[in-house]
Image (spheres, rainbow, N blue to C red):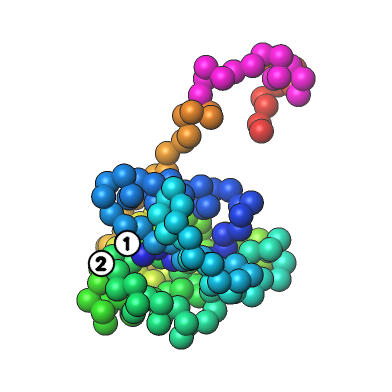
Amino acid sequence: IVRLANFVTPASGGLRTALCELGRGYRAAGHEPVLIVPADRHTDRETVQGRVITLPGPPLPGTGGYRVLTDRRRLAALLEELAPGRLEVCDRTTLRWTGRWARRARIPAVMVSHESADGVLRTWGVPEQLARRTADAVNTRTAHAYARVVCTTGFAEREFRRIGARNVVRAPLGVDLAERHPGRYDAGLRARYARGDEALLL
């Protein structure tokens, strides 16, 4: 299973964690997961989540250091070399072309969507109606390019349902119960940051 993702850094949270846990799960189930992400240079190493390959990708201005895979020729050559049995992609903008690549290679491919495209566009200052139209266009092309669109959140799923996509599957991400468990509650720590009647959001 080859997995592709943009907008991942060594310090990024949710997506990086989800990719790692999925890789660990695939590996435990007997698969050979390979994750390809952008970085400042090429690396190739075995990890607890399987093989992780980084390819040079430029930083995206205004995103706090996120990088993107932009060298299609190099990525396509690597995909050919890896010859995956399945393809999972986590970026419906710059990596959407890999859906067509997978179809030509007769490989089942899924797009994993964690966010709402119109929400991301609005955070960049795009007016609401334009953000919605743009997201609908991107999502329509995405739904046509992949066998399945796996949405990990309700707002990601709603965008695809809005355009009438019928290949959408909802797969909510879990919570790390080892680190976030009611048994780890600490009254002293809570009292340091909020009064008893206040909601505390960390």
Of 172 and 32, nearer the camera is 32
Q: Position of residue 183 (x, y in %)?
A: 52, 17
**198 over 126 or under it: above or below:** above
Asked if the magenta segment contains residue 185, the reply would be yes
Residue at 71% x, 19% y is 189
Q: Taking 30 as reference, is 157 left or right?
A: right
Is residue 134 visible to the viewer in this orientation of the structure?
A: no
Task: State which region is magenta.
Answer: 181-193
Based on the picture, tell me whether residue 142 belongs to the magenta stretch: no
Instruction: List x then y, in percent, for residue 93.
Output: 49, 72
Residue drawn 66% across the image and 31% down it = 201
Q: What residue does disc 2 label?
A: 85
Q: Residue at x 51, y 47 (%)?
A: 17
> Is the N terminus in the top left, top right, bottom left or bottom right quadrant?
bottom left
Mark earlier in primary sequence (2, 1): 1
Instruction: Name the residue nearer the viewer: 97 or 41.
Output: 41
- Residue type at numbered disc 2: Gly
Furthest residue toward right: 192
Whether residue 89 is visible to the viewer of this picture, yes or no, is yes
Q: Position of residue 98 (x, y in %)?
A: 38, 76
Counting labels gives 2
Q: Which residue is mark 1?
A: 1
Left or right placement of residue 64 versus residue 173 in this view = right
Q: From mark 2 to mark 1, how far is it between C-alphas?
A: 6 Å
Q: Is residue 29 above or below residue 90?
A: above
Label 2 environment density (alpha carbons within 10 Å; few <14, some 14–19, many ≥20): some
Which disc is residue 107 wearing?
Answer: none
Mark 2 in CB contact with mark 1 (< 8 angstroms): yes
Query: Label 1 sits on what residue type?
Result: Ile
Quadrant housing the C terminus = top right
Image quarter of residue 139: bottom left
